Amino acid sequence: MKNYFKILVLPLIVIVFTSCSNNDDDDSTVMFKATINGASEVPASGSSATGTATLTYNATTKIFTLTATYSGITATAAHIHKGDVGSSGGVVFPLTAASPISYTSPALDASQEADLYANLYYINIHSQAFQAGEIRGQLIKQ
């Protein structure tokens, strides 16, 4: 009877300890968020259009997914640019302009990853009236 008890208890103990050690916190995922508006444009556009963006970066695969929504603008183009707050920069990743925007990046190289972590990427949404960009939001690590 004691051997039967050992046979049943031992697997139960292993299952309990194994289930307690699962990793619910994924350290490989990093979130970035942006509030998109005309005041963030360089120079400020005065547009009342607004939007939000969430970028989820997988540090293991080096790939991010971006979801952005906006309203109050008829967009003609949308991009992720490289530039610090208050400065403009070149296009790094082209996006589709229709809201909601959904984008999955290629794997980032070391320089792009460093720029992302330094909060040097911003989303810019362009319109016919503001061809250089009507609303903008800096992607900030959360």
Image: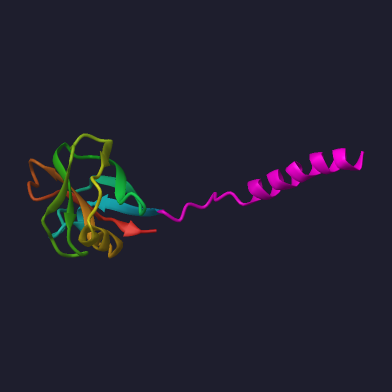
Q: Is residue 89 magenta?
A: no
Most frequent secondary structure within the magenta stretch: helix
Most foreground residue, 126 or 95 = 95
Instruction: Identify the image quadrant of residue 66.
Output: top left
Report the front residue among 123 and 47: 123
Is residue 4 shown above or below 41?
A: above
- Measuring from the top left, give residue 97's x and y in whole percent: 18, 37
The residue located at (32%, 59%) in the rendering is: 140
Q: Residue at x 8, y 50 (%)?
A: 132
Q: What is the span of residues highlighted in magenta in the rendered image?
A: 1-28
Q: Where is the C terminus found, in terms of image quarters?
A: bottom left
Colouring: rainbow
* Residue lying farthest to the front in this orientation: 3
**Closest to the observer, 22 or 51:** 22
Q: Position of residue 78 (x, y in %)?
A: 16, 43
Instruction: Give the residue drawn at x 18%, y 37%.
Output: 96
Q: Quadrant of residue 103?
A: top left
Residue 52, compared with residue 43, is above or below; it is above
**Residue 60 in the image: x percent, y percent?**
36, 52
Q: How many marks?
A: 0
| Percent coordinates x, y for residue 21 in the rendering | 62, 52
Q: Is residue 91 left or right of residue 63?
A: left
Q: 61 and 10: which one is in front?
A: 10
What residue is drawn where x is 24% and y is 45%?
105
Q: Give the position of the N terminus as an image quadrant.
A: top right
Residue that lies at the very extreme toward the right in this rendered image: 1
In the displayed structure image, the side of residue 38 where residue 1 appears, left or right: right
